[in-house]
Image: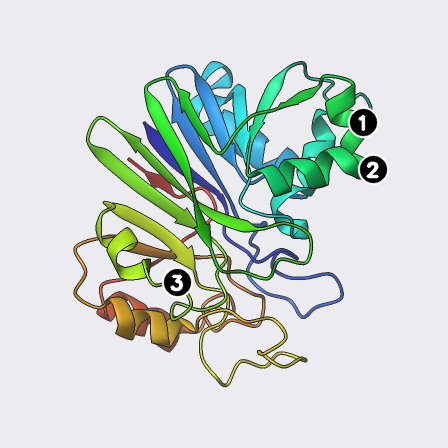
């Protein structure tokens, strides 16, 4: 199993539309490359360029999409599945693994519903097994305007990875420390850096744990922690050297588009 970070930006990417210039990041997504094709964990609006980059990295056969696994129903995590429909790639029978609420949201709303009704995608479940890789959805607390939210736990041959791009608060998830500790690698929510984030709205309206608090909370864990889903206002996304130094000094990492995790 090989994991490739397809994108590491928040739902609007970096830079955002009409936003100030920033080092480029596409929307957060992860590819799990197996011997039987690739599982896309989240499929956002940048999936075309992301899949082209993946194909260049691993080859056409290994980049073939065997399944899609979704975390929740916010724009940066599922809107790319339109590219599987008849107006675009026109795939056939690719399973989408997600919770019941996520699958119901897609099937009951257009333009997503027609992609399923026409058989380009088919409803899967909250777990998968493909090419010797197992995946399991783990419920996490996150804004549920449309669907519930999950992290994906992926494992193969004694290696385990947790993909958790969005969570409202570590305090609201009692199993946070235990769940992260039992994985070898965890890509976790790094949306906002600290309380001085120059965003135009209240953090209470878009709750996420702050990177500085995540570092303090999980310092010393045996799990390799990689921060992803960076908002365009995040000091890490702005390329702030002191913020990157703080993260590295604490033993954490920052996800980058194209990053390979073996």
From what the image shows, is residue 242 above or below residue 177? below
User: Residue extending furthest bottom?
Assistant: 196
Colour convention of the picture: rainbow
Q: Is residue 85 visible?
A: no
Q: Position of residue 228 (x, y in %)?
A: 45, 56
2 or 3: tag closer to the N-terminus: 2
Q: Which residue bears the numbered disc 3?
A: 173
From what the image shows, is residue 93 above or below residue 40? above
- Label 1 packing within 10 angstroms: few (<14), some (14-19), many (20+): some
The quarter holding residue 79 reads top right
Which residue lies at the image location 58% right of the left edge and 22% below the top edge?
A: 95
Q: Quadrant of the N terminus?
A: top left
1 or 3: tag closer to the N-terminus: 1
Q: Which residue bears the numbered disc 2?
A: 110
Badges 1 and 2: C-beta atoms under 8 Å apart? yes
212 left or right, relative to 236: left
Q: Quadrant of the C terminus?
A: top left
The foreground one among 183 and 150 is 150
How far is disc 1 from disc 2 in space, using C-alphas? 7 Å
Which residue lies at the image location 58% right of the left edge and 51% below the top edge?
A: 148
Q: Position of residue 67 (x, y in %)?
A: 53, 24
How far is disc 1 from disc 3 in space, using C-alphas? 35 Å
Camera-near label (2 vs 3) is 3
Badges 1 and 3: C-beta atoms under 8 Å apart? no
**Mark 3: which secondary structure?**
loop
Q: Position of residue 88 (x, y in %)?
A: 77, 24
Which residue lies at the image location 62% right of the left edge and 42% below the top edge?
A: 101
The quarter holding residue 209 reads bottom left
Q: Which residue bears the numbered disc 1?
A: 114
Camera-near label (1 vs 3) is 3
The quarter holding residue 204 reads bottom right
């Amino acid at each position: 199993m090989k994991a490739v970070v397809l994108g590491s930006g928040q739902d609007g990417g970096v830079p955002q539309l009409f936003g100030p210039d920033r080092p480029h990041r596409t929307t957060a997504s992860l590819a799990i490359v197996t011997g039987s094709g690739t599982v896309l964990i989240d499929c956002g609006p940048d999936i075309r360029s992301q899949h082209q980059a993946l194909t260049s990295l691993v080859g056409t056969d290994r980049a073939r999409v065997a399944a899609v696994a979704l975390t929740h129903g916010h724009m940066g995590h599922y809107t790319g599945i339109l590219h599987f429909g008849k107006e675009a790639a026109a795939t056939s029978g690719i399973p989408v693994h997600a919770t019941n609420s996520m699958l119901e949201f897609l099937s009951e709303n257009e333009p997503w519903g027609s992609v399923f009704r026409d058989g380009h995608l088919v409803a899967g479940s909250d777990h998968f097994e493909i090419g010797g890789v197992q995946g399991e959805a783990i419920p996490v607390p996150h804004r549920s305007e449309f669907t519930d939210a999950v992290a994906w736990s992926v494992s193969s041959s004694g290696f385990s990875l947790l993909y958790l791009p969005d969570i409202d608060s570590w305090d609201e998830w009692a199993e946070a420390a235990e769940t992260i500790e039992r994985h070898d690698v965890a890509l976790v929510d790094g949306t906002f850096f600290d309380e001085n984030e120059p965003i135009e709205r209240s953090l209470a309206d878009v709750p996420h744990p702050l990177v500085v608090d995540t570092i303090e909370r999980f310092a010393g864990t045996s799990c390799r922690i990689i921060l992803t889903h960076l908002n365009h206002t995040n000091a890490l996304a702005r390329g702030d050297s002191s913020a990157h130094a703080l993260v590295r000094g604490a033993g954490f990492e920052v996800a980058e588009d194209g990053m390979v995790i073996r």
